[in-house]
Image: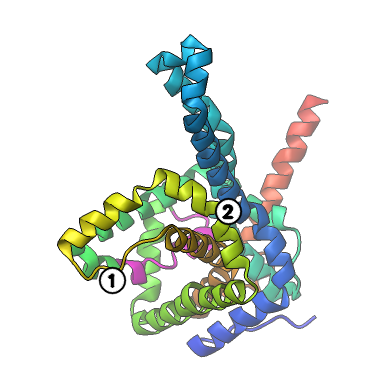
């Protein structure tokens, strides 16, 4: 089977990424199912169970004096939120792993034209779990710095030059965490403008066009008002809408009043946006994997790629452990 040659052309990169993602859409949706929906389910469990507990707390306090104790109340809230927190944490971690594993998935597709064996691709990341966590921690520090308005421009520049750190992590496993940043800077240097164009185009698709498209579909099929009606009562109970309206009217007399329906609809829209952005993660990952390959000349056609060597090493370790236990 002929292997796919990656072209050093940002338009080709974008079109190829869209083609790979769209032709394997159902496989990628299955791959992202728990990492995305698990986060939503975990958060819903946390807030819904906590809301129910707060609602019935006065009744519980009347029947059971132990619930009048502050320590008991806090411990109860913690216990109630643990199941949702565990689900959310596991899903969030899987989400981070998939972003790194997509690089191995992309390389495999270039060699075989097939998408399969996601657990093996995940192993290319989980086999170096502490190093991967360190990479995300350092990356998060840059994000926290960039939140400061005084560092927005610097943060934007860093974001462009460090966009390929996860690709370096996957394709160059010998690099340390700090070297991933250095290597990404070296790769992007001289290609920053084209990298920015790719970032803007893919961001426009996954964060705006796709989101707005699904929002229109939800509105047209009346799903938005249906979901909004489910959240309206709960949200308005715990959000001081009247206080917010009064505060804003004092600042701006022409302020458009917030209504429970608006709040619930906005909440539904945020859920839709999160789902769309989450399920389109493979598209962004494929794009940057292809861009890394294009800029480095690493076409993913070596006799044995770095990611495959890691998978073999993980498999060998599992086999060795099994033999020792026998």
**Marks 1 and 2, Cα distance to the nearest angstrom?**
43 Å
Give the x, y percent position of residue 253.
19, 67
The quadrant the C terminus occupies is top right
Q: Which mark is residue 230?
A: 2
- Protein image colouring: rainbow
**Residue pictured at 80% horizontal, 31% vertical:** 323
Q: Is residue 99 visible?
A: no
The residues colored magenta run: 158-175
Determine which residue is flagged by label 1. 157
Query: Is residue 139 shown left or right of residue 105?
Result: left
In front: 217, or 116? 217
In front: 13, or 224? 224
Give the x, y percent position of residue 18.
61, 80
Say which label, 1 or 2, has the lower sequence index.
Answer: 1
**Residue pictured at 57% horizontal, 41% vertical:** 45
**Residue pictured at 28% horizontal, 54% vertical:** 244
Give the x, y percent position of residue 44.
55, 45
């Amino acid at each position: 089977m002929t292997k796919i040659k990656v072209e050093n052309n940002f338009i080709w990169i974008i079109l190829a990424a869209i083609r790979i993602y769209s032709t394997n859409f159902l496989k990628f949706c299955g791959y992202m199912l728990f990492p995305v929906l698990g986060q939503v389910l975990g958060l819903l469990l946390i807030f819904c169970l906590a809301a129910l507990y707060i609602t019935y707390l006065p009744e519980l306090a009347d029947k059971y004096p132990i619930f009048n104790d502050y320590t008991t109340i806090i411990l109860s809230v913690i216990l109630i939120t643990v199941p949702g927190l565990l689900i959310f944490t596991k899903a969030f971690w899987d989400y981070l792993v998939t972003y790194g594993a997509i690089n191995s998935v992309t390389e495999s597709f270039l060699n075989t034209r097939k998408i399969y064996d996601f657990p093996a691709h995940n192993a290319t990341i989980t086999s170096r779990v502490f190093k991967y966590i360190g990479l995300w921690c350092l990356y998060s520090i840059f994000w926290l710095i960039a939140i400061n308005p005084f560092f927005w421009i610097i943060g934007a520049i860093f974001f462009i030059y460090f966009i390929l750190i996860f690709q370096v992590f996957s394709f160059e496993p010998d690099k340390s965490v700090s070297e991933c940043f250095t290597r990404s800077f070296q790769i992007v240097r001289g290609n920053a403008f084209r990298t920015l164009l790719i970032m803007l185009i893919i961001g426009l698709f996954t964060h705006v066009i796709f989101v707005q498209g699904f929002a229109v579909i939800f509105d047209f099929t009346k799903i938005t008002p249906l979901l909004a009606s489910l959240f309206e009562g709960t949200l308005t109970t715990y959000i001081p809408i009247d206080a917010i309206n009064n505060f804003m009217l004092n600042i701006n007399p022409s302020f458009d009043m917030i209504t429970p329906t608006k709040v619930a609809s906005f909440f539904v829209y945020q859920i839709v946006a999160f789902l769309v952005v989450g399920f389109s993660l493979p598209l962004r990952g494929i794009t940057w994997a292809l861009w890394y390959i294009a800029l480095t000349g690493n076409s993913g056609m070596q006799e044995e790629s770095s990611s495959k060597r890691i998978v073999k090493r993980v498999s060998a370790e599992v086999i060795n452990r099994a033999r020792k236990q026998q």
